[in-house]
Amino acid sequence: MAATPLRTPARAPNAALAAFLTRYDGLRERLPGPHEPRDAAAEVLREMGWPTPKEEPWHYTNLRPVEAQVFHEAVAETGDGTRLIAHLPAVAGPRLIFVDGRFRGDLSALPPDVTTSTFAEGGASSGFDLLARPKRDRLVALNTMLAEDGAIIDVAEGIDGGFLLLGQLTSGQHRRVASHPRHRLRLRRGASLVLLEVSAGEGEYLHNPVIEIDLAEGAHLTHVRLQQESAEAFHLSTVYVDTAARATYDSFSLSLGAQLGRSEIHARLGGAQAAVHLNAAQIMGGTQLSDFTTVITHDAPNCASRQTVKSVLIGRARAVFQGRIEVARVAQKTDGYQMNQALLLSPDAEINSKPELEIYADDVKCSHGATVGALDPEQLFYLRSRGIAAAEARMILVRAFLTDAFEAVTHEGVRAVLEHAVETWWNTTGRAAEALAS
Amino acid sequence: MPAVAETLDTVRAVTGSTYKWGFETDLEMDIAPKGLSEDTIRLISARKEEPEWLLAWRLKAFAAWKTMAEPHWAKATYPRIDYQDIHYYAAPKKGGGPKSLDEVDPELLRTYEKLGIPLREQALLAGVEPSPDDRLPMAVDAVFDSVSVATTFQETLAKQGVIFCPISEAVREHPDLVREYLGSVVPAGDNFYAALNSAVFTDGSFVYIPKGVKCPMELSTYFRINARNTGQFERTLVIAAEGASVSYLEGCTAPMRDENQLHAAVVELIALDDAKIKYSTVQNWYPGDANGKGGIYNFVTKRGACRGARSRISWTQVETGSAITWKYPSCILQGDGSVGEFYSVAVTNNCQQADTGTKMIHIGRNTNSTIIAKTISAGRSDSTYRGLVRMMPKAQNARNFTQCDSLLIGDQCGAHTVPYIESRNATAKIEHEATTSKIAEDQMFYCRSRGLSQEDAVGLIVNGFCKDVLKELPMEFAVEAQKLLAISLEGSVG
């Protein structure tokens, strides 16, 4: 008698997913590009549903709060765009603005040295899922099924594309909407670009962007992501990166917003001497949940990956970090380093961290470290004894804690944006939570 | 460096087939028919003359097991196990348990001599004089397939109030203790293999150290799987009452066979206020041949509960054997100020797969845990450290330090680290470090330039790599462990 599998406890039907599948049936003919990948994605979702904590990659993040909701399609061209734009950081330069997942030419300023188009106009027909894995990553399947628009960015060989802002704004003020933008970024041989990607919005909504990034030989992309969604929002984003030889993907993700957020990055080092930096900071308060999940795959020799992830938690906030480094047999001389640190500022905050190494090559140098703790009382005492008020002293120490993660951002304008965002967070959410805690 | 020299001697001594414990003993056996059902469980219970409550407990575990799915989250691949194709009871025939060593089948005693446990000698020495070589005497419980065949020094221990006997005997002689503690750390339905063990366990060791007693000698169990197509499901229960302390050793071997054999043991440790338990394992089950044929599936649940304040449980393991290891000796740090430790060396070679680690669950205040895990992979093997450190909301000022180091020998093996770190207490402090590397060329060059052969140099470096763990082992075991390391890695370089 073989053991019968344990029955999973009944889970309420997934209203959100059911509504999305119905929407797809209605929208199918109007969506851009070929049907096949979308039909296949719908099939995957129908068969497997979306992820539950029973699945290892979702062990710490339960999508149940999302499941209970029904998200609507955003009405085209609401007047909200002009108001929402105020949520973007004050930074000059070219910008591509999306509102509710659709490109808004009227709010954008096209970059001079970079070719841009949209997913809706032509991007979709050149095929999607170049790097994305909708069969494995089912929120990506959701995106593949329903993606309407997105930015298609192409930097030609040897060109320095300079700075570009990608703004994604969602308006959940009137009805609970969902958007699934699909972006694609290609840097040709020796090209470079600094991309600041901002997600923000108002009200209750689901933002489910997918970005595919292809870096040719010697290309260099600085990708800074600022997640500042509204307090009621759900943010579930996935980035896929593939680097050729000597290419560099240098990314920093700062998560501040959303009631439930997960940012997933899959980076593959596909050519020799490529480098990937996946740095991040998650600063959370209230009852927020923020999940930063990364998979770095070393698939070529002599590559390096670096990762520093910091979490600052206050109130009843919870942060998750899952970072896996995979080293294939061919990836000899790999240099992999990962550091994950969490600062718990209140008794009810919680951190779950899972740094993983999966190594199949012998001539490698891989290490990871993780620390979890509170502010050092001795350091606090030192500052207090010099006449600095308690709240101020704590802020100084928190800022110091975040410093080495922020230092990875070398573009000064962009770093100023991040620092300003943290300052604003502290002066609103942080201080309020501090006051409650003390 | 005498230990290293000894290691190298052993390597030289062992040629060809490197598993020297691979003999089979021809004994008359009492074997239950293959298969698992309520009837099998009733038969085991009847053979053991067990009370009704224990049978009921077994049947409940069996009912739970039937609803469970075999876990496959570990990083190991193996063909489906047919749980109906196993003998769940195998015992040397001789009618009734042995009353003394003289009644034990001489063939069996010879087996243990081959294993290097001179039971007879030790029994003779008991109560006479300490061993001539000035080593502390060691009490041994030997478990052969399903039954405990001999326990030494029982009388000496009894004078101090220490109970050290087969668990089947404890069920008869000390039913209240067994009933109170059995399944209190690893409940019958804890996981698939623990449930299976609870349903069919046949023997194992029982240790009770009364209040304030420091156990006068090391206690040890030797496990041996001998019969073909049998599974071994032993159950060990160690209880240290207030202020008591004990050091317990466990060793395991099995014959070489082409088919895989299942070993699903459960070990429960309970430490009350100020008690100390040190549990050391040298696991050397047959690992299968160079092509991965045969070998033991070692699916074991080991857990210790630091129930009392300032109690301490320390796990030390050297894992060199088994085709597949699935084992996570854990500590539940309940008592305020309790301490959990885990020291591990896991070596895999050829086609072995090991997925091992620990769980440290911090519940009480000021609890402290240390994890040192060293993983060595060679050949085409895969080795995974998987561990959990969890700080519960009440674990004020709890501390954990974890260090996991992996060493890769050859480019066909894998080494993996999967730590889970969870903290729900801001005052708790967790530190985790992990590294993966190979033997550095400059280390090799240094040794080679001083005239060491390639293999000697590797032996030296590996022993150095494992030093932090090996020093935690009782002396006799440390020597054996060093030998095993060398043998396990034989043929992996050059």
Image (tube, coloured by chain):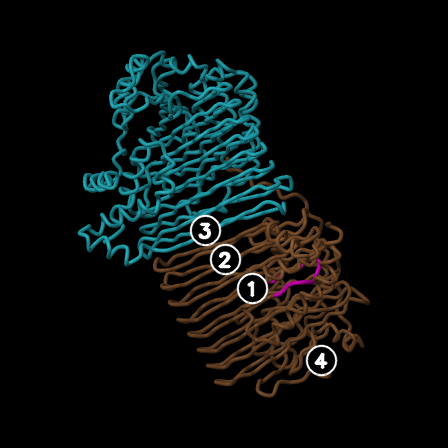
Q: Judge depth for marks 1 and 4 and give the one in front.
A: 1
Q: Are marks 3 and 1 on the same chain?
A: no
| Residue under label 3 | B417
**Residue A260, which numbered label?**
none
Residue type, mark 3 in image: Thr
Residue shown at the point (48%, 13%) measured from the top left:
B173
| Nearer to the camera, A343 or A199 | A343
- Labels 1 and 2 in the same subunit: yes
Evaluate whether label 1 is on the same chain as label 4.
yes
Q: Say if B381 sits above or below A276 in the image.
A: above
- Which three-letter amino acid code belongs to the residue tagged 2? Arg
Name above or below for residue A232 compared with residue A171: above
Classify mark 2: helix, strand or loop: strand
Dot 3 surroundings within 10 Å: few (below 14), some, or many (20 or more)? many
Is disc 1 in contact with disc 4, using a CB cutoff of under 8 Å?
A: no
Rounded to the nearest whole Å, what is the CA distance between mark 1 and mark 2? Answer: 18 Å
Rate crowding at label 1 as few (under 14), some (14 to 19) or many (20 or more) other CA atoms within 10 Å: many
First-in-chain label (1 vs 2): 2
Chain coloured cyan: B
Q: Nearer the viewer, residue A7 or B120?
A: B120
Magenta residues (range): A254-263
Report if residue A60 is visible in the image: no
Query: CA–CA distance between discs 3 and 1?
Result: 24 Å
Q: Could you tell me how far apart the alpha carbons at marks 2 and 4 are, in whole angstroms?
A: 37 Å
The chain ID associated with circle 3 is B
| Residue B183 visible to an observer of this rendering | yes
**Mark 1, secondary structure of its residue:** helix
Discs 4/3, front: 3
Residue B308 vs residue B15: left or right?
right
Specify the colour of chain A.
Answer: brown
Residue under label 4: A104
Q: Which residue is mark 2?
A: A324
